[in-house]
Amino acid sequence: MTGTCEFPTAGFSAELRRREPQGFNPRDLLLEKIVQPPEGPAATIDLRYEEQANPGDFDTVTILPTVQPFQYRRCSDMSAPVNEQLTEPNDYELSCDGVTLTYSTTSFDGSPRLSFREGGRALDFSGEEIGTLATKLGTEVTVTLEVISDDRTVTLTLLVPAINLGEGPDIEFATVAIETTNLTTIGGPALITGPLQT
């Protein structure tokens, strides 16, 4: 199976990986497109995936949404040291594939702030509109992008790993943001057949 990806700048790398676990349909092969962003002029990348399979094993191949690491750059502000060794940032700037996120753990009134920009779409969140959950992977920061009654709710979850700035004013790293569509009905989830989240 082969494919082609076109990116806005040169230097991207991309590959296809078999999704584990696979989905509920054993005849639909699920592949993940893994993208690593860079900088430079536009580029096109050819993709290829191969595995041993018997004729008739699969009817279709589904390439899942891009697993895309966001590039992070910290602003000039710093929070108080967590302990004597660690200094954590409180301002984050992230961008990837036309999406820009800014996240501040605090602001002038002490509440967090998050902004989402994609093309002409601009959404701003503050205070209780931003949910945070500490996990072993880092802090999950979640906001609701869209709510359509009796249809769906779309959320965005940004994973913020633990970071030690040390003596530097900023630092760069890669992370992920996941957009989830939660299907809803007035009668509850029992009226939906199939996955409730995509």
Image (cartoon, helix red, strand yellow):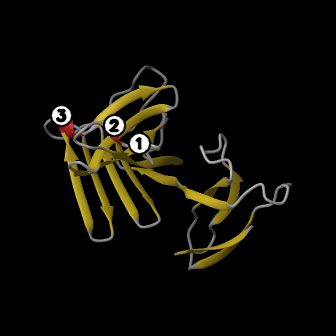
- Of circles 2 and 3, the one toward us is 2
Q: Is residue 153 left or right of residue 169?
A: left
Q: Residue under label 1, please give it.
A: 196
Instruction: Provide residue 57's location: percent of width, then percent of height.
Output: 77, 54
Q: Residue at x 33, y 70 (%)?
A: 119
Amino acid on which disc 2 is placed:
Pro
Q: Nearer the viewer, residue 32 or 45?
A: 32
Q: Residue under label 3, please give it.
A: 110
Indicate the secondary structure of the residue bearing disc 3. loop
Instruction: Provide residue 108's location: percent of width, then percent of height.
Output: 15, 40
- Of circles 3 and 1, the one toward us is 1
Q: Is residue 64 left or right of residue 165?
A: right
Amino acid on which disc 3 is placed:
Gly
Q: Of callouts 2 and 1, which one flags the residue occurring earlier in the amino acid sequence? A: 2
Mark 1 nearby-residue class (10 Å; few <14, some 14–19, many ≥20) = few
Amino acid on which disc 1 is placed:
Leu
Q: Nearer the viewer, residue 192 or 62?
A: 192
Q: Do labels 2 and 1 touch, CB within 8 Å?
A: yes
Where's the N terminus, which quadrant? bottom right
Determine if residue 171 is in view: no
Mark 2 nearby-residue class (10 Å; few <14, some 14–19, many ≥20) = few
